[in-house]
Amino acid sequence: MRISTCPAFKTPFALSLSKGSAEPAETPSLRSGEGFTPRGLAMIEARLREVEATLAATTDADARKKVLREARYWRTRQATAQLAPMPPQDSVAFGSRVRFRLNGQDRTLDLVGDDEANPAENRIAFSAPLARAMMEAGVGELLDFGGKTEAVEVLEIEVSASMLGES
């Protein structure tokens, strides 16, 4: 079994309930150096613009609190976001597009940040179990996954469109 780590790992921003409060308390646990693709950064900026427009139009005090909390979240994401380095093309990393075989089926996935992940569009978070299993693997490597020996075969590695700022 091969165990690897991703240098871009981060702890996601967490919302937790404060004692005696029904409202979530913000518990930012973002680490400096958090990596994002150019596409992911653009998504954060677009979402922040949407939330700030909603905030400007919201007058109800209770609704405004919720929108303010979301605005703080996205401002923090934007303030701490750093562009991830271009991934190598000889091993799987954050920002890679990986073609692989799992259970006899060939698939292609982009490994992106948590905010950008969308499995329906073949983008998974680099923190997802499958992505973690493939980190640092090279073409032709057989990887253990889901309790199965040599369950994943890496077929091809390239830079994802997200790293190039494309959809």
Image (tube, rainbow, N blue to C red):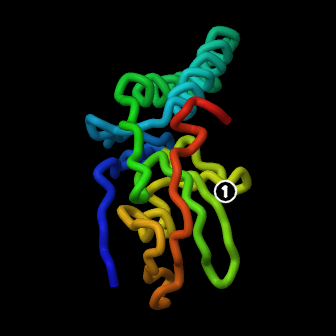
Q: Is residue 97 above or below residue 101?
A: above
Q: Look at 26% across and 35% down and name the residue there.
A: 32
Location of residue 15 in the rendering, given as x and y in whole percent from the top left corner: 44, 45
Task: Say which element carries label 1.
Answer: helix
Q: Quadrant of the C terminus?
A: top right
Quarter of the view holding residue 85: top left
Q: Residue furthest top?
A: 56
Q: Is residue 95 above or below residue 76?
A: below
Location of residue 23 in the rendering, given as x and y in whole percent from the top left corner: 49, 40
Location of residue 70 in the rendering, given as x and y in whole percent from the top left corner: 54, 29
Q: Is residue 36 above or below residue 123?
A: above
The answer to whether residue 91 is left or right of residue 162 is: left
Q: Which residue corresponds to mark 1?
A: 119
Q: Is residue 20 visible?
A: no
What residue type is disc 1 on?
A: Pro
Q: Look at 40% across and 45% down and name the residue there.
A: 87
Please tell me how crowded label 1 is: few (under 14), some (14-19), or many (20+) other residues with Cα within 10 Å: few
Q: Is residue 143 above or below residue 9?
A: below
68 or 97, which lies in front?
A: 97
Location of residue 77 in the rendering, given as x and y in whole percent from the top left corner: 43, 30
17 or 53, which lies in front?
A: 53
46 or 167, which lies in front?
A: 167
Quarter of the view holding residue 162: top right
Quarter of the view holding residue 80: top left
> What number of labels is visible?
1
Q: Quadrant of the N terminus?
A: bottom left
